[in-house]
């Protein structure tokens, strides 16, 4: 398989599914420092266009990170080089998000892959679209 | 001030600084589902090109989210529409990250702002660059 790097070739598709709970939103707020009341406080969130608390957009992007980090490279690891994100719909605490990645281009010499990255909710509505660039890397033997 | 929306005008600069601790990396792993050993396991991380644990790239992006969510809009809230991310250098647990945002364009009619978004570490090395698009929104009165 010449057009393959560490088990990754063009057309490879992987998914990762995770429910984003209210607790996850609180953990992300603590980890990132983003304690905007829209995400954490019911009274403020009710005064917004959403009428209820919404998850941080970057937390939804974290589900893409999970797919890249844990599912993409069978025989090595992925090192994140870049990501574009277009937020299409709000994600509410309790929603179940599936990130789907597809390898759309592969530079075998430089071991770089381009991925389409899409997140959908439990109603199959697209909530996030974008593209990622990753370096496919091997771990050294112990 | 005609060329202003909810206290935001072109040239406005805000920053947000946060240390990314090993605990923050663990919280983000739990919130996102990204439990890649490169971020969590010393033995695996030693076999990588970094030689030690690194923070998730999307967690560093979370510091941009914090700046947008908590500092950008004096008289309202920011709703994330899009973000591009180019990861320039690894962030290690213990690093202190400063996100700097500058408003580079403003569509007053549609209330949309474009921001340059840069993160640097405690040594003033740029670790992340990109651009964000946000909707500037008001909260309804109670």
Image (cartoon, coloured by chain):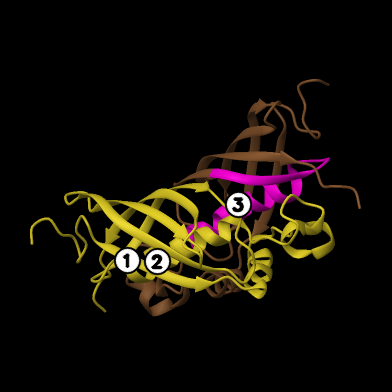
Chain colours: A yellow, B brown
Q: Secondary structure at mark 2?
A: helix
The CA span between labels 3 and 1 is 36 Å
Q: Which residue position holds label 2?
A: A67
Within the image, what quadrant is residue B102 found in?
Answer: top right
Mark 3 element type? loop
Residue receiving disc 1: A14
Residue at left offset 59%, top offset 65%: B94
Q: Give left or right: position of A22 versus B75.
A: left
Residue wearing tag 3: B122
Where does the magenta region start and end? B54-82
As displayed, is residue B93 above or below residue A118? below
Where, quadrant-wise, is the N terminus of chain A in this rendering? bottom left
Question: Are there few (<14), some (14-19), or many (20+) residues within 10 Å of tag 1?
Answer: some
- The x and y percentages for residue B67 are 69, 48
Left or right for B71, reference A139: right
Residue A64 in view in this figure = yes
Rendered-image quadrant of the C terminus of chain A: bottom left
Could you tell me which secondary element the residue under label 1 belongs to?
strand
Residue A64: quarter of image: bottom left
- Badge 3 density bin: few <14, some 14–19, many ≥20, Cα 10 Å: few
In front: label 3 or label 1: 1
**Would residue A78 be found to the left or right of residue B29 on screen?**
left
Q: In this picture, is B91 found above or below B43?
A: above
């Amino acid at each position: 398989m010449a057009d393959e790097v560490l088990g990754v070739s063009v057309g490879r598709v992987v998914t990762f599914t995770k429910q984003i709970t209210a607790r996850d939103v609180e953990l992300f707020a603590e980890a990132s420092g983003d304690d905007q009341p829209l995400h954490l406080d019911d009274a403020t969130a009710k005064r917004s266009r959403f009428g209820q608390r919404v998850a941080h957009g970057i937390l939804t992007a974290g589900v893409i990170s999970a797919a890249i980090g844990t599912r993409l490279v069978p025989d090595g690891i992925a090192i994140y080089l870049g990501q574009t994100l277009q937020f299409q719909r709000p994600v509410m605490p309790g929603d179940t998000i599936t990130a789907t990645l597809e390898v759309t281009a592969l530079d075998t010499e430089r071991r770089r892959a381009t991925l389409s990255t899409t997140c959908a909710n439990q109603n199959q509505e697209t909530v996030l679209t974008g593209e990622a660039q990753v370096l496919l890397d091997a771990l050294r033997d112990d």
